[in-house]
Amino acid sequence: MDYWFSDMHTGNVKISIRLAKQLFSGTSEFQRIDVFDSPEFGKFLASDGNIIFSEKDEFTYDEMIVHVPMAVHPKVQRVLVLGGGDGGVARELCHYDEIKVIDVVEPDNMFVDVCKQYFPDNAVGLEDDRVHIYYQDGLKYLRKCEDMYDLIINDATEPLGHEAGLFTKEFYGSCYKALHDDGIMVYQHGSPFYDEDEESCRAMHRKAYRVFPVNRVYQAHIPTCPAGYWLFGFASKKYHPLKDFNPDRWDERGIKTWYYTTHLHKGAFMLPKYVEDLLQEEEDMSR
C-alpha cells in the first residue's frame, strides 16, 4: 500500500510526498509535530500539517539566511536567532570563529527534543559552547533587549499561530532597538507566487520598510516551500547587502556550502518583475 503526506500550499494546490514510514507524532503546547521518512526527501518535519524542512533541502534555507548577512557585516560577535530550534541556523553560524554569542529563543522544547533525536545533523549546531537556548516567547524576549546584537535572524515559520508575534509592527521595532547601530536583521519573507500568500509578503516588507533605513529582499529555490520559491528579507541600520558586500573576505574563510556562493549572493537580489512591483508598491504607499 502507498502512503503519502500532502501539504496544502493553497486551497487548490498541494505537494504530496511518498512516505517510507512515520517516525514520530506528538502534540506540544504550541503545535502538532510529525516526522516522516521518505524516499525522495529523506526525513522531514511537519508542524500542524505543513512541511517545515527536509533533510534534502534544508541546506538551502539555512545557508541563505546565515551567509548572506555574514558576508556583509564586517564584525558579527553577538547573534540572536528567533525560532531555530532545529539547530540548522546555529550550525551555519558556528562556522564563524569571530562570533562569541549565539542566543536561540525557541518557545517549544518538544520541537528541540524531536530535532535532536531525528535530525542530529541540524541539532549539532545547538551543542556549540557559544549557543544558549531560551525557551520563551520571542517577542517577550525582544522587549527586554536594547543595543545587544549585531545580527538578528528571525527563523520563525508562520505569521499565524504561536509565532504570530514575530511578524508584527512591534516586532520590527523591537528588533531595531535590540540591534547595535550597525546591526542587521534577516527574516523569512515567504513565497509571493500564490495570491493567498502575497498579502503576508506585502505586509512584512511594509513593516520592515517603515522601521529600517536599508531594506532589500532576496530569493532562493527550496523545493518543499510553496511554489518551490522562497523570499528572505534583509533589513539593516547601516549596511547594504550589495554595496557593503565583501566577497573576497567571505571566500577566504573557506566555508563549505552546498547552495550559497558569493556569485549567487549578488544574483539572489535580482528579483522577478512581479516581485519587484509588489515590493515597490508597498514602499510607495509607505512614503
Image: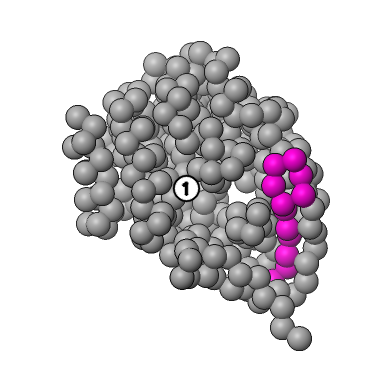
- The percent coordinates of residue 144 (x first, y second) are 58, 15
Quadrant including the N terminus: bottom right
Which residue is identified by label 1? 64
Q: Residue furthest front?
A: 11
The quadrant the C terminus occupies is top left
Based on the displayed image, in which of its 4 quarters is residue 197 positioned?
Answer: bottom left
Q: Is residue 174 above or below residue 125?
A: above
Which residue is at the front of the view, 81 or 27? 27
- Please give the name of the residue rendered at 64% of the width and 29% of the height, measured from the top-left corner: 137
- What x and y, as percent, mark residue 174? 47, 21
Residue 207 at what x, y percent from top left?
Answer: 36, 32
Does residue 219 show up magenta in the picture?
no
Please give the name of the residue rendered at 76% of the width and 44% of the height, measured from the top-left corner: 28
> In the image shown, does 15 or 48 lie closer to the viewer?
48
Picture quadrant of residue 71? top left
Q: Is residue 260 above or below residue 187?
A: below
Q: Which span is picked out in magenta? A: 27-38
- Residue type beneath disc 1: Met
Q: Residues within 10 Å of mark 1 (few under 14, many from 20)?
A: many
Residue at horizontal 36 percent and vertical 32 percent from the top: 208
